[in-house]
Image (cartoon, rainbow, N blue to C red):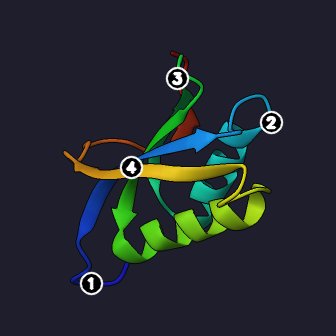
Amino acid sequence: MRAGEEVERIRYRFVGKVQHRGFRYACVMCAERSGVLGWVRNERDGAVTAEAQGTARAQLDFVRRVTALVPGYGDGWSIAREDAVELVEGETRFGVRRT
C-alpha cells in the first residue's frame, strides 16, 4: 500500500453459477494476489458473499482477477451487489468461511 491510500472494506455478492465449481477458492487465490484481506462464503440461496478489505486499487485488482479466472462472468455469473462495510481490525489473511 502506498502512503496516503485509504483502506476500504467492500461486501461483494456473486450470483449465478458460482457454487460447486471452486469459486470460493478462486476468490482466495485472487485476494492473496491482490493484497486484500477478508473472507468468502457460500450462501444458502446459491450465491457467494465475500468481504474484501484493502485499497481501492487492490479492490479493483481483486475483482478483475476473479472475473478473469472464473469462466462465465456476465453470462453464467455476475456481481449483484457491492456495499461498503465497516473495517475489521486485526485481520491477517483472506479465507473461506462456512455458513
Amino acid type of the residue tagged 3 in the rendering: Glu
Q: Secondary structure at mark 3?
A: loop
Corner quadrant of residue 21: top right
Frontmost residue, 89 versus 63:
63
Mark 1 in CB contact with mark 3 (< 8 angstroms): no
In front: 40, or 71? 71
Please tell me which of labels 3 and 2 falls first in the chain: 2
Q: Which residue is mark 3?
A: 43
Q: Name the quadrant containing residue 90.
A: top left
10 Å neighbourhood of mark 1: few (<14), some, or many (≥20)? Answer: few
**Alpha carbons under labels 1 and 3: distance apart:** 36 Å
Q: How many numbered dots are placed on residues in this image?
A: 4
Q: CA distance from mark 4 to mark 3?
A: 14 Å
> What x and y, as percent, mark residue 35?
51, 63
The residue under label 4 is 81
Q: Mark 2, mark 4: which one is toward the viewer? A: 4
